[in-house]
Amino acid sequence: MNLTELNKIARGMVAPGKGILAADESTGTIKKRFDAIGVESTTDTRRDYRELLFRSNEAMSKYVSGVILYDETIRQKAKDGTSLVKLIEQAGSIPGIKVDKGSKPLPGCPGELITEGLDGLRERFIEYRQLGARFAKWRAVIDIGPGIPSYTCVSTNAEALGRYAALCQEQDIVPIVEPEVLMDGDHDMDRCYQVTEFVLKEVFQQLYYQKVALEGMVLKPNMVVPGKKSSKQASVEEVAERTIKLLKNCVPPAVPGIAFLSGGQSDEEATAHLDAMNRHGDLPWRLTFSYGRALQAAPQKAWSGKNENVAAAQRAFTHRALMNSLATLGQWKADLERKAA
Ligand code: 13P
């Protein structure tokens, strides 16, 4: 393991003013997104859409530090024959790859999931590295509900994250460690805090047991938010305060950066929350975004599968990327959204 190199890449991924574009939707997930805009999901439409994002020059060169790709995309070529990986590199952004194989029911734990994909992972890392990946992502999914999460679910997922991260670093690839506590339920913010704390404590214990170098990784957590169906919603400042308190209690300062998932927050909420956290200042790690939906919902809608909409889609993507870039610096303002609209 070359820790100096890993640390350099990790710091690049969370560089001030920049964050990560999570464009690693599985074939099933991107189909859902395309269904919503009335676009058939084929190898070509997926390529056209992602090519449009990666050719958004301003966004990619100024605001996007890295892109998480899916297995299909890391092998695809743009219409003119240039590989999509090359487009990302030419913009000065770092290619990364989702390596987990999704989640399956966890035996003995009704309603809970375990992420799969460890078998053969070393060999897959070797190939992905040759294809240009310098970082990877593995997502564990933890749901909150009556009686869940169980310790079985939290500990088995944390162990898998540890095994993935250790293998990643062995192959000189920076692991994004993503334990996502879902915001789907009707739980309140306190419960989200408790569960996320439990999960992060367990994950960092496993990273320690499995000899993962914290300087060479990036954490991708959820924020502390009430469940979507909760009757008690929270202010931007409450989310920022609770999330920072939680992270200070769980994430060692050796970790270079934390890149949040958006997890179903609206575009503007995801930006406002990140901005409020960065306004606090005096944090031991960089805080940035690794958004999927909160960066892509707007460009997907603007594009709607039509060639003539490519420029409008690129503008929509660039706008969201700029808003989130400002949020990484604590310099976003709500009226910048209105002006753009
Ligand atoms: P969202 O921002 O849409 O939650 O996606 C981020 C991600 O990569 C989830 O694994």
Image (spheres, rainbow, N blue to C red):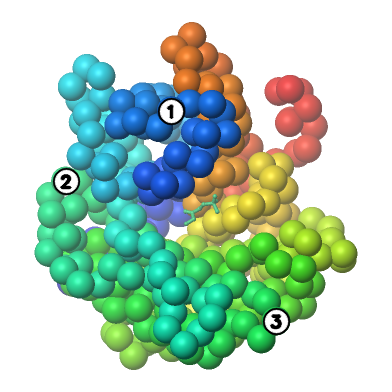
User: What secondary structure is marked by label 3?
Assistant: loop
Query: How far apart, in angstroms, are the residues tagged by discs 2 and 3?
Result: 44 Å
Q: Nearer the viewer, mark 2 or mark 3?
A: 3
Q: Which of marks 1 and 2 is in front?
A: 1
Instruction: Specify the label residue 131 is tagged with.
Output: 2
Q: In this view, does 273 lie above or below 193?
A: above
Farthest right residue?
Answer: 231
Q: Position of residue 127 (x, y in %)?
A: 13, 54
Q: Quadrant of the C terminus?
A: top right
Decide which of tag 1 and tag 2 comes sooner along the chain. Answer: 1
Decide which of tag 2 and tag 3 comes sooner along the chain. Answer: 2
Place residue 105 in its image quadrant: bottom left
Q: What residue type is labelled 1?
A: Glu
The crowding category of the residue bearing disc 2, from other C-alpha atoms within 10 Å (few below 14, some 14 to 19, many at least 20), is: some
Which residue is at a point 35% across and 78% down the rendered structure image?
A: 160
Q: Note whether residue 171 is visible.
A: yes
Instruction: Specify the label residue 146 is tagged with.
Output: 3
Which residue is at a point 49% across and 33% down the rendered structure image?
A: 34
Place residue 14 in its image quadrant: bottom left
Query: How far apart, in angstroms, are the residues tagged by discs 3 and 1?
Result: 38 Å
User: What secondary structure is marked by label 1?
Assistant: loop
Q: Where is residue 101 in the image (x, y as percent from the top left)?
A: 32, 62
Which residue is at a point 16% across and 46% down the rendered structure image?
A: 131
Query: How far apart, in angstroms, are the residues tagged by discs 1 and 2?
Result: 28 Å
Which residue is at a point 46% across and 47% down the rendered structure image?
A: 29
Place residue 198 in its image quadrant: bottom right
Q: Which amino acid does label 2 sit on?
A: Leu
Instruction: Specify the label residue 320 is tagged with.
Output: none
Q: In which quarter of the image is the N terminus?
A: bottom left
Left or right relative to 324: residue 228 = right
Q: In this view, does 90 lie above or below 193?
A: above
User: What secondary structure is marked by label 2?
Assistant: helix
